[in-house]
Image (tube, rainbow, N blue to C red):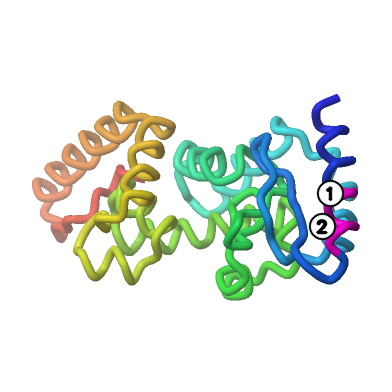
Amino acid sequence: MKKILSLLFLFMVVNSNAGGLKAVFKHGEVVYTNISKNLFFSNAFRYSNYGKKRIIKLIERIAGQYGVSVKLARAIAEIESDFNPNSISSASAKGVMQLMDETAREYGVKNPFNPEENIRGGVRFLKHLIEKYHDPRLVAAAYNAGETAVDKYGGVPPYPETERYVKKFMRVYGLKEFVRHKRKAVLRHRRIVKEGNTYTNVGVGLW
């Protein structure tokens, strides 16, 4: 009932703002964006059968295809959109993985409201960040604030929003999970050195 009432409210708000500001429902609240009402509503109904369980299964499948931690991809999706394929932020980030238009284009996402396209683009972006930073905290920070900010500060940027984001990410992702992966990485390193292979400071078992 709440969802139906919210959609009805949105319909009234959108139509009362012809050519102007458009309203979009997200996380139980209304945020504003300049997205076309036709684009939003056509996609809202087209992908209305994508419930949370189906979205999570998509994340698990696509993350597995790209060798990305399922728990990490799920944590990002949960924080970004709570697995909502129609989610739009006030900054116009869209879909399950909340992709900005530039990022969506870079990773070949033509329709950011298509759950499979959006998740695939987001997972590919995560894979790039993982290969660059090798640290879940920095991956989350870069996903939120951008690579330029993380590179500039050499770590989590001192932005209140990003610091809160990373803390929330670590709660959802799981500190124990992070520590467990770190330990596995150290053990793999020791074995690699003992076997005479080339040593690297990248945690082989981290992801």
Left or right of residue 86, residue 168 in this image: left
| Image position, residue 58 (x, y; %) | 67, 43
Q: Mark 2 and mark 1 in contact (Cβ < 8 Å)?
A: yes
The quarter of the picture where the N terminus appears is top right
* Image vertical order of residue 159 relative to residue 82, above or below: below
Q: Is residue 202 magenta?
A: no
Front one among 137 and 28: 28
113 sits left or right of 195 in the view? right
Quarter of the image for residue 118 reads bottom right
- Residue 38 located left or right of residue 203: right
Where does residue 53 sit, x and y in percent of width and height? 70, 30
Reading the image, the residue beneath label 1 is 44
Q: Write down the quadrant of residue 134 in the picture.
A: bottom left
Q: Between residues 36 and 47, which one lies in front from this camera angle?
A: 36
Query: Residue 16: within the magenta?
Result: yes
Q: CA distance from mark 1 to mark 2?
A: 6 Å
Quadrant where the image shows the C terminus: top left
Q: Residues within 10 Å of mark 1 (few under 14, many from 20)?
A: some
* Residue drawn at x 61%, y 54% as measured from the top left: 89
Q: Residue at x 21, y 34 (%)?
A: 183
The correct choice, above or below, for 68 with respect to 175 in the image is below
Residue at 43% x, 32% y: name it. Answer: 172
Name the amino acid type tagged 1: Ala
Classify mark 2: helix, strand or loop: helix
For the magenta stretch, what is the residue range?
A: 11-17
Q: Position of residue 110 (x, y in %)?
A: 73, 70
Left or right position of 192 against 28: left
The majority secondary structure of the magenta stretch comes to helix
Residue with the mark numbered 2: 40
Q: Nearer the viewer, residue 75 or 205?
A: 75
